[in-house]
Amino acid sequence: MRCENPVMNQILDAYKPMWSLNHAISLMGWDFETYMPRKGTEERGVADSQLHMLYKDLLLSKDFVGLVESAKKLGNLGDLEKGIIRILDREITTQIKIPKELTEAESLERIRGNMVWRGAREKSDYMIYSPHLKKMIEIKKQIVEKIGYEKHPYDALLDKFEEELTVDDLDKTFGALTSRIQKILKKLEDSGSQFCKESKLGKSKYDIQKVEVLNHEILTLLQYEKERFRMDVSTHPFTEALGLNDVRITTRYEGTDFKKSISSTIHEAGHALYNLQCDQSLSGTPLEGGSSLALHESQSRFWENNMGRSLPFVQLVAPLIKKQVNFANQATDDELYLYFNNVKADYVRVDADEVTYNLHIAIRYEIEKKIFGDELSVSEIPEFWNDKMEQLLGVRPTKDSQGVLQDTHWSSGLFGYFPTYTLGNLVSAIIASKMRKDLEEYDEVIKSGNFKPIREWLRLKIHRYGSVYAPKMLLKNTFNENYNPD
Ligand code: MG
């Protein structure tokens, strides 16, 4: 990308080495989760933290900060140029406040804590992991104080993942959402709804190699280009974009309940599409990728839920499923549809259905808010977690692996991240309702397996802009909406 203004071009040139470091860090992160030998952890931790610090040196170099400062004074800038300055200025303003020792301590602890968490989760023993959680929270609290905040300390962490997001926003969102979801759940359960009857399709063991073939067939149906995209396997599925033309996802195979593997694949592919359909002119600039985590999650959730669990989609993929999953070959479309949409209040967030999912996030939000508001200590977290589970979902974990140890986020220092999942769900619902109005014969389009109009709609409304616009602005401009819980 070239700009009219020479200062902007100097900025883009100086950003190239930073982009390259991010590229390498992403590749290392992908490798850490997929193929790295376990004993490589400590060395990888050093390399990762050193690269992060090199990045920081470049970002905060006098010349670069000077260029961004002079660009801020320029008039007549276009949206793209304004976007570049907004992103870089945000990053400089935050990074300049965090001392190098803290950056280093956090990245070292990220790798160490994550490894210990993995072991603790296997043994279901919170005590093994809690010293690392305590250390990470201490580091994060120091970072919060350095960054600063207006109202709530947790705001400083939320803003990192979702520009301008605050505790006030989230209190409103969850305040309007939680009790209404509980009502829906109760209504479903009390009425003996078909959706609450557990399907036998989730019980039998499947052939992993065949479900792998099935996932690839679904990706082909969704038109993923093999030259720019790949899929591997990891415990926790994720998407890593190294650039706009090397986007990688992972999925998981647990051996039973095949819908989990399919849903994970479709979910991550939804994330990938956001990067793959970003305007190529933004490649190598601070604008490539998505506007925010919530916007990103709105894409994965749209494909996973609004699309992947819809009746026409299930009808479309039913023949593929029947071909690869032998015990499903007699299932009717309706049986498959009910299986994909089964509702059950249960322990594990990543397995949660559409109805209960946001209740899991409400729990994590409240815990994180209390941790950073100094209202909850590390030793009190497991019990508080279990109490909240019982209160909101009506189930009480009997071991830590079903409760506090289930998520990887805290061990990797990701505090303030969870709420973006719920915001993403809300935005995905907004998108689905707008798309239905714009695209005639929406259901028929899906049933016929022609996803082009849908991909194109998403590209034009959201994907092509990358992070040119902040999330609140993009929602306002494109949909005249916000993180609307209604
Ligand atoms: Mg996701």
Image (spheres, rainbow, N blue to C red):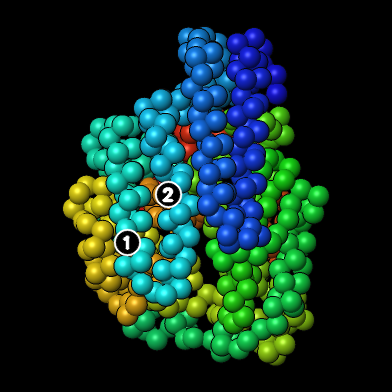
Furthest-left residue in this view: 375
Counting from the top left corner in percent of width and height, residue 259 is at 60, 75
Task: Tell me which residue sits at (63%, 86%) in the image.
Answer: 205
Task: Tell me which residue sits at (57%, 72%) in the image.
Answer: 260
> Front-most of 473 and 38?
38
Task: Tell me which residue sits at (68%, 89%) in the image.
Answer: 327
User: Image quadrant of residue 80?
Assistant: top right
Task: Tell me which residue sits at (42%, 56%) in the image.
Answer: 113
**Nearer the N terminus, badge 1 or badge 2?**
2
Q: Which mark is residue 450?
A: none
Q: How many marks?
A: 2
User: Label 1 to label 2, Cα distance in Å?
Assistant: 13 Å
List the residue tagged with mark 2.
109
Q: Decide if residue 434 is on the left or right side of residue 368.
A: right
The quarter of the picture where the N terminus appears is top right
Disc 1: CA contacts within 10 A as few (<14), some (14-19) or many (>=20):
many
Mark 1 touches mark 2? (CB < 8 Å): no
Counting from the top left corner in percent of width and height, residue 182 is at 31, 69
Q: Secondary structure at mark 2?
A: helix
Establish if 94 lies above or below 455: above
Q: Is residue 307 visible?
A: no
Q: Secondary structure at mark 1?
A: helix
Disc 2: CA contacts within 10 A as few (<14), some (14-19) or many (>=20):
many
Q: Which mark is residue 130?
A: 1
Counting from the top left corner in percent of width and height, residue 352 is at 46, 70
Q: Amino acid at mark 1?
A: Ser
